[in-house]
Image (cartoon, coloured by chain):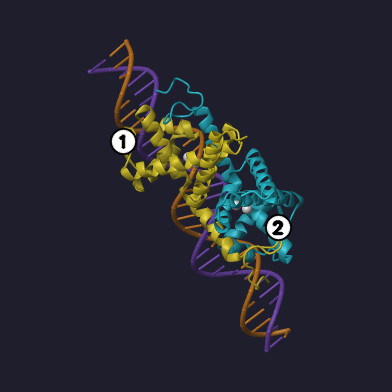
Chain colours: A yellow, B cyan, C orange, D purple
Amino acid sequence: MSQHENIGHDAETGLIDANAQVESFRQTRNNRRTELVEDYVELIADLLEDGGEARQVDIAQRLGVAQPTVAKMLKRLGAEGYIQQRRYRGIFLTDAGRQLAELCRERHQIVESFLCSIGVSAETARIDAEGMEHHASPETLEAFKRFLIQTTSSRIAGEA
Amino acid sequence: MSQHENIGHDAETGLIDANAQVESFRQTRNNRRTELVEDYVELIADLLEDGGEARQVDIAQRLGVAQPTVAKMLKRLGAEGYIQQRRYRGIFLTDAGRQLAELCRERHQIVESFLCSIGVSAETARIDAEGMEHHASPETLEAFKRFLIQTTSSRIAGEA
DNA sequence: GAAATAATATAGCCAATGCTATTTTTCAAT
DNA sequence: ATTGAAAAATAGCATTGGCTATATTATTTC
Ligand SMILES: [Mn+2]
Ligand SMILES: [Mn+2]
Ligand SMILES: [Mn+2]
Ligand SMILES: [Mn+2]
């Protein structure tokens, strides 16, 4: 069955094109593989900028996980070249780490602000953005930004 | 350090409240644990409605994974009460399964339509929605729906 | 109805992400 | 300098979600 290719949607309940669907699922699985790295690097950058140091206990407390979980992930971050670790010293970001952190922080900010701008409460926006950010493509981020600019200028112009 | 509680954002680069942040991360981790179940159930419902049967090979092809991967997940779906499986027969949804599928399908549709409505291309909307849907809370979905209704009525009223 | 094909089941492997319990190291106080 | 507390490292375990290779079971076809 389903030998007849359907391009795009057909009717209401019909299946979308198989190749298109598999592409979506693959991309989503790919995004999932980097979610954690992104959140760690972003958080480490925040901690470094705020207090000057990013310790495992701080990271663990902020993420709500146990310290050995953080220790293990930090090894991965080190192996992937995002941080430098010296035993019993704090964590530092490499150039690559700082670069990724900046990207993630911007993206996160755009998503969260966007949600607020369409009427989502600050608390819910904070929660939802933490997950959604990792699946927002550059194109979607551009759309979010356009929207933010529009509503900002509308508000300045004094619209309802 | 960081014994002084900061409620909400402080300044530009400052850290948000630790309790708030941990709540976001926990919620996001929670959502992640159900993502796959949701996608499977939604896909099975689509296959059943379209061709009348949902076979492992079809599911595997649509998801872009191997058949044994699907077989394993179907055991989980069965254990969680979403499907009924008879060896070498197709998959069927239980009442709980149909209910979950309906919820997921609506949510997915809202997210995807919303992205399109703010100017994201159909292809990108399809891809991004596949991941973002699992992190959209009821409140955010309501905001998306409000926006969809607004832009629909604006278009009907003939705005630019 | 026997053979070929297709679908499913099963075994065994791996990587990622979490946990608890324990040991080791560093740091701070006395 | 010793000691006590805090932080980090390590060991060992569980679950989830992937894979390949292979064995079973149904279904088609001849
Ligand atoms: Mn983030
Ligand atoms: Mn995040
Ligand atoms: Mn979906
Ligand atoms: Mn999905």
Circle 1 sits in a helix, a strand or a loop, which is it?
loop
**In the figure, A71 relative to B156: above or below?**
above
The N terminus of chain A, quarter of image: bottom right
Q: Is residue A49 visible?
A: yes
Residue at figure coordinates x 52%, y 50% from the top left: A140
Q: Is residue A106 above or below residue B10?
A: below
Q: Residue at x 43, y 44 (%)?
A: A37
Q: Position of residue D18 (x, y in %)?
A: 52, 58
- Note whether residue A55 is visible: no
Q: Chain of mark 2?
A: B
Q: Residue A77, how many percent across, how many down?
A: 38, 44
Mark number, residue A87: 1
Residue type at numbered disc 1: Arg
Can you tell me whether the CB of the residue at mark 2 lies under 8 Å from the nearest atom of ligand 3?
no
How many residues crowd mark 2 within 10 Å: few (<14), some (14–19), many (20+)? many
Respond whether the residues carrying marks 1 and 2 are from the same subunit: no
Q: Which residue is mark 2?
A: B45
**Residue B29 percent across, percent down from the top left:** 55, 41
Q: Residues within 10 Å of mark 1 (few under 14, many from 20)?
A: few
Q: What kind of element bears circle 2?
A: helix
- Chain letter, disc 1 residue: A
Decide if residue D24 is on the left or right side of residue A62.
right
At 64% from the left and 51% from the top, the residue drawn is: B108
Image quadrant where residue B141 sits: top right
Kind of residue sitting beneath label 2: Ala
Q: Nearer the viewer, mark 1 or mark 2?
A: 2
Choose top left, top right, bottom left or bottom right for residue B150: top right
